[in-house]
Amino acid sequence: MSAVQRVDVPGVIDDRVTISVVDGIADVKMNRADKRNALDNAMFTSLNAAGEYLKKLDGLRVVVLSGDGASFCAGLDFSSFAQMAEAGAKANAADDKADKKTDMNAGSMVDGRITHMAQQVCWVWQEVPVPVIAAVHGHALGGGIQIALGADIRIVHPDTQLSVREVHWGLIPDMTGTLMLSRLVRPDIVKNLVFTARVFSGHEAHEMGIATQLSQNVHADAMTMAREIAGRSPEAVRGAKKLINLLANSGAAEQFAAERETIGKLIGSANQAEAVMSHFEKRPPNFESGSLFR
């Protein structure tokens, strides 16, 4: 085995994401353990920078994506939800909603992409031309599970707590989750997970087909699988991923545009703000009759 090489990636902020490479295997870690690797502006930016770097890395064979500390990723940082509630209580105009998304940096688009920044932190792992294995433990909630869904393979600890959590916050899974989950799981199960926002275990995720396999040591087993894949013909592996994705990801641009349109109507709306405020105030929500989607 060659020596492990720590890579300094342009665009990564405050070491929010670390990358080490050995024998063509990139070990990518979200590095915000004190916040369960929650997603803030710096994490969004850093994940995107890491993915873009890996897309062009010579000699890359496999990527292993994991979270440092006790969790894979607990989803959006709580401070962002508090900002949504505060802003939503003050503003109703569509241009105000666009401003709020820009403040979070998650809604910004880049020319030539089919995603905005929040979607790209998940989709970039499909664009990386080699297999991406997510090693998932602890928590994978909201944006966290959507990042895991962006990987090609998911090795999950059976006790992991997972949730498509967005509806709890008055939102929808807009980080490519509607496509990525729907291609793995029956539509009625997808709807159950999204509508209820319930937490489920890694064991149940495996039964539903979200987890590729279960493991008591997800990172070690992901690295073992990565070494096996790295021993195959790199052209064959890259070609196979391209062909499989060509079929599996058909219609992605249209679906992601629909996600952006829907989330744009929800962020800052009265009911979205009420979902957030009722959570933090620990009381039942008092929702208005919905009129955004008829």
Image (cartoon, rainbow, N blue to C red):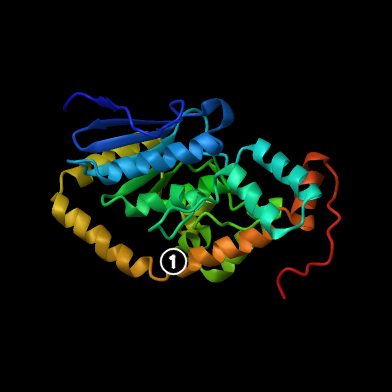
Q: Residue 291 at what x, y percent from top left?
A: 77, 70
Residue nearest the observer in this picture, 47 or 157: 47
Quarter of the N terminus within the rendering: top left
Left or right? Give the position of 194 relative to 5.
right
State the residue at coordinates (56%, 61%): 260
Left or right? Give the position of 113 relative to 55.
right
Q: Residue 177 at what x, y percent from top left?
A: 51, 58
State the residue at coordinates (35%, 45%): 133
State the residue at coordinates (33%, 38%): 221
Q: Identify the secondary structure beneath mark 1.
A: helix
State the residue at coordinates (22%, 60%): 240
**Which quarter of the figure has residue 263?**
bottom right
Residue nearest the observer in this picture, 121 or 94: 94
Q: Amino acid at mark 1?
A: Ala
Please indicate, yes or no, whether residue 199 appears anywhere in the rendered image: no
Q: Residue 153 at what x, y percent from top left?
A: 36, 51
Left or right? Give the position of 22 relative to 161.
left
Residue nearest the observer in this picture, 53 or 235: 53
Q: Which residue is mark 1?
A: 253
Residue nearest the observer in this picture, 201 or 60: 60
Q: Residue 18 at what x, y percent from top left?
A: 38, 30
Q: Is residue 101 above or below residue 245?
A: above
- Characterize the local packing of mark 1: few (<14), some (14-19) or many (20 or more) Cα atoms within 10 angstroms: some
Left or right? Give the position of 245 relative to 266.
left
Q: Is residue 90 above or below residue 260?
A: above
Furthest residue toward front: 95
Q: Is residue 96 above or below residue 179?
A: above
Quarter of the C terminus within the rendering: bottom right
Counting labels gives 1
Please indicate, yes or no, whether residue 100 appears anywhere in the rendered image: yes
